[in-house]
Image (tube, helix red, strand yellow):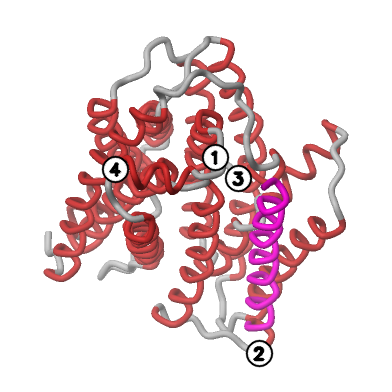
Amino acid sequence: MRLNTSSLSTLVLLAITSLATISTTSAASSSQFAVPRRAFVSKIDTKEKVVPSSQASLELETSSLLTSTRGGSSTETTMAKETGLPPAVKLLIGAGGIYGAFLYYGSLQEDVFRYTAEDGTQFKQAWLLQVLEALANVLVGFVGMRLTGATKNIPQMAFAISGASQVSAKACTSLALANGLSFPVATLAKSGKMAPVMLGSLILGGATYSIREYLQVAAIIGGTAVVSMGKKKGGGSSSSTLGVAYIILSLVLDGVTAGFQKRLKAETAKAGVKPKPYDFMFWTNLYMCITAVVISGALGEVGTGLAYCAGNPEILSKIIKFAICSAVGQSFIFYTIANFDPLILSTVTTTRKIFSVLLSIFLKGHTLSLTGWSGIAMACGGILSEMAAKMGGKAKAH
């Protein structure tokens, strides 16, 4: 396996910093969970926080947990004093880690599915990729859980269902990329995950939304469609169509995951337990890994995928780095949640998606027409508008 020296050095540095954040988060978590029990009341409106699947799903679970145990508006200052670091330094560590890990994560994910071997074959084993990614997160989650202390009597069935739903959504995103959908289009489409959540709430829950919320979702979806039509590329229409089908299925599963996560919160509250951040990371990814192992095994991806990696060491190194970035990035997410308001995390992860799209366009050879760029602007406008709405709501709450 050939590892680029600079890339390996970056990963080692991120991994070392990640272990440091686990220890820091441990200290932060112990002080937080010493606070007397409070009701599970989130500081951010539920509709705004339903951001399931992938990294965002664990953001939702842990941010709702930690906001419920805090209380008070001076959280950042208090936490900074407790751990001895200035807020600016802690924000630099958290945001820098998230940007570094997940920007590289996105780039590697795109590289994995664009890779073409000498015989013209490509890596299509999306479920095997989920096995390896989840396994890396399980290992880091286990270390973090040992350091922060494991929570007993966690409702395993709720975690199992949530994990199975999340990994299915992630696998569909990977399958979309494997079947010809470009990374910028897939990333922008996934930013519109509020669409299926809103639709389900309207049909089943009788929820109401503001005109602004409808316009935000419409801008993201419409902009994504415009980008797809504005890409200058030839052929591959059938694969692109299949890719679109998979990304739509992934969005539907995002909506399903949101419902399961609400049930998970209810089950943990009913059981009288409050899982810590690394409890979420370990148990969720454990069930994600188990689900992916079963499905990849049933589809015959384990043998073919490992054989493909063995015959193409270059892609194996990308997959390993991809899995490491996922686990390291999750640790920085937990670090940020533990020390700052969830709105800070939402801002970081939202802008990270925009930068991931722009980096992919500039570094991976995507060519857009003027129409495509107008779509980028429309979709990013919708994403930033959603973020601004959250910030406005937070300001009113104070």
278 to 313, vertically: above or below: above
Provide the secondary structure element on which disc 4 rests: helix
* Residue 106, horizontal then vertical, whole percent: 41, 62
Label 3–label 1 contact, CB within 8 A: yes
Badge 4 crowding class, 10 Å Cα cut-off, few under 14, some 14 to 19, many 20 or more, is: some
**Residue 122 showing in the rendered view:** no
Q: Earlier in the sequence, mark 1 or mark 2?
A: 1
Task: Give the residue at mark 2.
Answer: 370
Look at label 3 and name its amino acid: Val
Residue, x 25% and y 34% (percent of image)? 139
Task: Give the residue at mark 4.
Answer: 83
Left or right? Give the position of 44 relative to 104.
right
Residue, x 61% and y 70% (percent of image)? 237
Q: Earlier in the sequence, mark 4 or mark 1?
A: 1
Look at label 2 and name its amino acid: Leu
Badge 3 crowding class, 10 Å Cα cut-off, few under 14, some 14 to 19, many 20 or more, is: many
